[in-house]
Image (tube, rainbow, N blue to C red):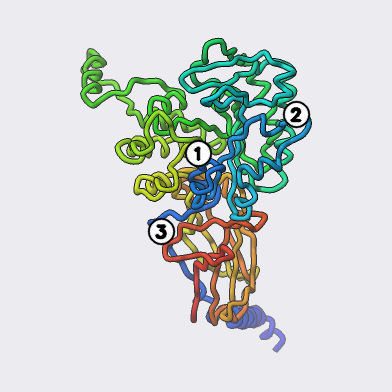
Amino acid sequence: MKSFIRKKLPYIMIALQVVMIAGILLYIVPGRYRLYDIVLYDAAENMPANPLIGYAPPAEKPEDCENTGLVFVMLPFSELEPREGVFGFDAIEAKYNLSAYRAAGKHAVLRLVCDIPGEADHRDIPDWLYQKTGDGTVYEDASGKGYSPDYGNPVFVQAHKDALTGLAKWCKKDSFVSYVEMGSIGQMGQWESFALAEGMKPAAETVKALYAQQYLDAFPAESGIRLLSCPGSAEQDHVGEWNDVLGDLQASKKWVGESIEVQTPEDEEAEKEKRQNRSGDIEEQKTLDDYLAEGAASLWMSGPVGGGLTETIDMENLLMDKLSDTLSQIRKTHVSYIGPVCPDAAQQNTNGSDMILRNVGYSIYLSRLQTTMDFIRDDLVFQLSFSNIGNAPFYWDWPVTMYVYDTKGECIREQKLELSLSQLLPDSTITVVGTVPYSRNLLKGYSVGISITSPDGKNFITMTQKGVVPKRSGIHRIYRYRQ
């Protein structure tokens, strides 16, 4: 008898294991397979207005800023520090309507300038600093009248450093100032991009390096303020670039590091014949877009690209006859914002203006959702794929949050997703994972929401999600499961 039991014991153990596994499966499996799902989403045709991209009109023109998320503050040194060691922030807040813009959830692009050409004789540096230096140049040229300081004067260099330190402290008190353009040197802070007026002293490269370093020290990457250099200033991994030449094809080509002649199709055919070699092959002719693409490739990858539309071409022309060229340059340079020269309030309602905005900045949406069960952890798993169909990244890593709601609308799960928005490049997709502990109530129904909200909770990104409008809290209800 004992021998019989010994022979049958392995089979008995196997049977018990089968019964145990069956019991576990009877507990785990029933109904859970119904939670498996895959959903593909379409992007909306219309690009929603979103924070930190688009037009940045002059802040002193509130009518032009009414429907924009950005404003542009062109700040003269004379207004920043009217008396030595005393900053004029109260007057600046009042002149540029900054309190109203803060309350409306707008953000600012700021450029400090020392020389703004005008119709009358004037200076844009403080009187006290002029008294200490006074070795600049009074000029009058095609751009207007003004005063160009000697940027290499050690007293001026130190005064600029102290002023920039005070400006940075003010900017960092909240998230209102989001972009700072390196200005200071040259007319309109453009680092002497244009021909100097008679008698002007060009800033030496060593002097430019001093000013660039002052900006880098005042606005480091961790400050949350995105710093943009003017061509010829600083090149750093976290620093973008600005230039007020968008719409001017020749100036844009020069900006991105290439200089070629504009050619008509007939000119290009003639040039091909000249370049035909003995074997009869024709060297490849690079298009104007090719040059823009090559030159701009290193700009937007390191930081945001911005700038105003050119003033050498009439705005109506840029929005109509020259619209194709304007759009091409904006796409190829991956611009995130356009200002201070941009369409005014009336021009913003035109088709040309709308086309431009469609090609500026990021555009993020959820392209795929897949649900599976993790039986080991006993979790319902969400694989969420986010895509960017815009022309630039979003340069801040705002928190991305997933919410799971029961059938009564109560939130049963809130989870921060490990998605770095700054890594979500144009035409790319990043998949992240969210989870919710399994309960049988999930089989009765649940829904999923997604939000991308600023750390201070004052702004949120509207995803380019077809058929989905976010709640006032910024939450997009993107999925619903019903039994």
Residue 25 horizontal/vertical position (percent): 58, 79
Q: Residue at x 56, y 63 (%)?
A: 474
Q: Residue at x 23, y 26 (%)?
A: 265
Residue 122 horizontal/vertical position (percent): 60, 24
Q: Which residue is mark 1?
A: 339
**What is the count of numbered marks?**
3
Of pointers 1 and 2, the one earlier in the residue sequence: 2
Q: Is residue 348 left or right of residue 100?
A: left
Q: In the rendered view, tell whether residue 163 sits above or below residue 398.
A: above
Residue 217 horizontal/vertical position (percent): 71, 31
Q: Is residue 282 left or right of residue 100?
A: left
Q: How far apart are the alpha carbons under marks 1 and 2?
A: 27 Å
Of pointers 1 and 3, the one earlier in the residue sequence: 3
Name the mark nearer the viewer: 1 or 3: 1
Residue type indicated by callout 2: Asp
Q: Which residue is mark 3?
A: 44
Q: Which residue is mark 2?
A: 162
Q: Is residue 397 left or right of residue 369?
A: right
Q: Secondary structure at mark 2?
A: helix
Of pointers 3 and 2, the one earlier in the residue sequence: 3
Q: Residue at x 54, y 32 (%)?
A: 241
Q: Farthest bottom residue?
A: 1
Tell me the quadrant of the picture where the N terminus can be found: bottom right
**Residue 226 badge:** none
Which is more toward the observer, 16 or 113?
113
Name the mark nearer the viewer: 3 or 2: 2
Q: Residues within 10 Å of mark 1 (few under 14, many from 20)?
A: many
